[in-house]
Amino acid sequence: MAASMLAAGILMAQGPKKDVGTKVPLPDAPQNGDAPRALSIDVDLVALDVVVTDKNNNPVSGLEKEHFKVLEDGVEQTITNFAPGDAPLTVVIVVEFGQTWGYFVDDVVGPAAGFVNSLREDDWGALVAYDIRPEILTDFTKNKAQLFAGLKRLQIPVYRETALYDALYDTLERLDNVDGKKAIFLLSTGHDTISKHTFGETLKKTESTDTMIYAVSMGQLFRTIYDGRFDPIDQITLLQADNTLRSFAEASGGVAFFPRFVSEYPSIYETVSIHLRNQYNLGFAPKNLKKDGKFRKIKVEVAKLDVNKDGKLDDLKVRHKKGYYAPKS
């Protein structure tokens, strides 16, 4: 695939500025002086997208600001901004399209198309595929037909090498420039063999991003069927691949799924959509004003509430990004 990057400079309050489509050339990648900047530059307000779920993983709605507590490196912060979020989504669908173990183990086109169908009319979607490098198949658009057209370009996988870390890092970096509610829907085996970025670099990026990653592991049925035929080294490699997807998802506040059957995909689409559309948007001005460039850990707590109306207080689970990098003087 030809190398390309997500377009920069197409931002507005909620998602990209316009429907780019597939036939409009992408702007040049930003040069060093124009590189996209994340929260590590001049942090005045830290924004958080928070998902709260009950013990059954169902989103909890109707919470107020007083129900939340935000801690930065263990120090409680003052929540200055609060709003339940039901804004349109900006989602990049990132799919692995290569030959894993010498052949392609799963159909990614079907699951990707299914997720495209789950988007609403006012949602923005983009499509990126990767093997030895990432390529934009469809830039940001509200037109599902454009996304389906991009999927049709995925015909026959060529390369055995896969650059998952590069694909994720590049996509996250471009999404730093997009405001609003953002997510990556990742269809991948979790393997990486050729990326320029390391696992550590990519994990560091996901820890501080405001883009949630929802990862779907491909090849689980194949692995179940042939489990007894893998040697110990292959078994470790497969477990590492699962851990990679889980680590990226959890670090960003998202979730990793490991489906074995096609029938599981509709529930995954529904779960991702419901979670993204039932977020709370929190903001705070950090009390620590040191410009030391260090990573600041964030923890959001929610008060115990009787959300199930059964007379008992429920332990609620909270998902959000893990922190941000302070400015460096």
Image (cartoon, grey):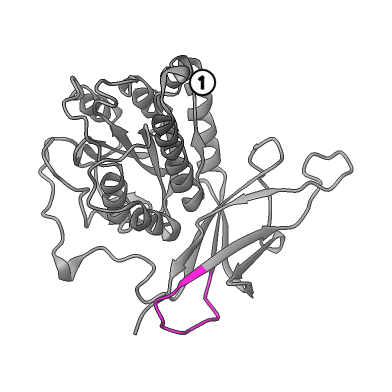
The magenta stretch spans which residues?
Answer: 284-296
Percent of width and height locating residue 17:
27, 51
Along the line of sight, which residue is nearer the eye, 83 or 29?
29
Residue drawn at the location 79% of the way across and 50% of the way down: 305
For label 1, the crowd category at 10 Å Cα-Cα, with few meaning under 14, some 14 to 19 and many 20 or more, is few
Examine the rendered structure and indicate whether residue 73 appears above or below residue 275.
below
Q: Quadrant of the N terminus?
A: top left
Percent of width and height locating residue 28:
10, 54
Examine the rendered structure and indicate whether residue 259 appears above or below residue 135.
above
| Relative to 182, 271 lies left or right | right
| Relative to 68, 11 lies left or right | left
Q: Secondary structure at mark 1?
A: helix
Q: Is residue 289 magenta?
A: yes
Q: Main secondary structure of the magenta part?
A: loop
Q: Quadrant of the C terminus?
A: bottom left
| Relative to 67, 16 lies left or right | left
Residue drawn at the location 52% of the way across and 76% of the way down: 286
Percent of width and height locating residue 53:
65, 43
Residue drawn at the location 51% of the way across and 41% of the way down: 255
* Amino acid type, label 1: Glu
Examine the rendered structure and indicate whether residue 65 appears above or below residue 284.
above
Along the line of sight, which residue is nearer the eye, 57 or 20?
57
* Residue found at the very far front of the displayed protein: 232
Residue for badge 1? 264
Q: Is residue 122 visible?
A: no
Percent of width and height locating residue 174:
27, 54
